[in-house]
Image: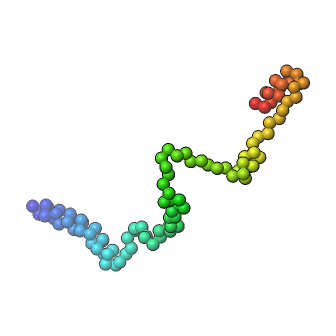
Amino acid sequence: MKNINLLLIILISLTSCTSFENAGKVLRNEKIKTTDEFLVKKRKPLILPPDYDVLPVPGEKISKEISEDEKIKRILKSPKKKEIKNNSSSTERSIIDKIRK
C-alpha cells in the first residue's frame, strides 16, 4: 500500500512539473513561437477592369483587331522561303531537300 501511494505521489508531481514550466513561461512573459501578424507582405489593391459594367451578349463573338504594328511584326518574324530554280537536276533537289530536313 505504501508503494502504491508513493508511486502515485511521484507520478502526480512529475506531471505537474510540466504545467509549472508552462506557468513559469507565462509569468516571465516569454515569447511563444507564433506567426507575427506584423510581418504580412503587403500587396497592391485590386483594380476593376475598365469595362466591368458592360455585360457581353450571349453568343457574340469577340473580334480581336490586330494593329498594324502587330501585323508588321508578324510579317518580319515569318521565316523566309528560298526558291529553287527549276533548271536544277533531280539529284540537286534531293540533296537540298535532305539538307532542309
Q: Nearer the viewer, residue 2 or 39?
A: 39
Residue drawn 55% across and 45% down? 61
Q: Quadrant of residue 16?
A: bottom left
Q: From this viewpoint, which residue is outermost toward the bottom?
A: 28
Say left or right for 64 vs 91: left
Q: Position of residue 92 (x, y in %)?
A: 86, 24
Q: From this viewpoint, which residue is outermost toward the top?
A: 90
Quadrant of the drawing holding the N terminus: bottom left
Q: Quadrant of residue 37?
A: bottom left
Asked if residue 4 can be seen in this view, the reply is yes
Say left or right for 88 vs 78: right
Residue drawn 20% across and 66% down? 12
Coloring basis for residues: rainbow
Q: Position of residue 51 (x, y in %)?
A: 53, 59
Asked if residue 43 can be seen in this view, the reply is no
Residue drawn 67% across and 50% down? 66
Q: Nearer the viewer, residue 27 or 79?
A: 79
Q: Where is residue 52 in the image (x, y as percent from the top left)?
A: 50, 59
Q: From this viewpoint, which residue is outermost toward the right?
A: 87
Q: Quadrant of residue 83?
A: top right
Q: Nearer the viewer, residue 52 or 19?
A: 52
Quadrant of the drawing holding the C terminus: top right
From this view, report whether residue 72 is shown above or below residue 14.
Answer: above
Q: From this viewpoint, which residue is outermost toward the left?
A: 1
Q: How many marks?
A: 0
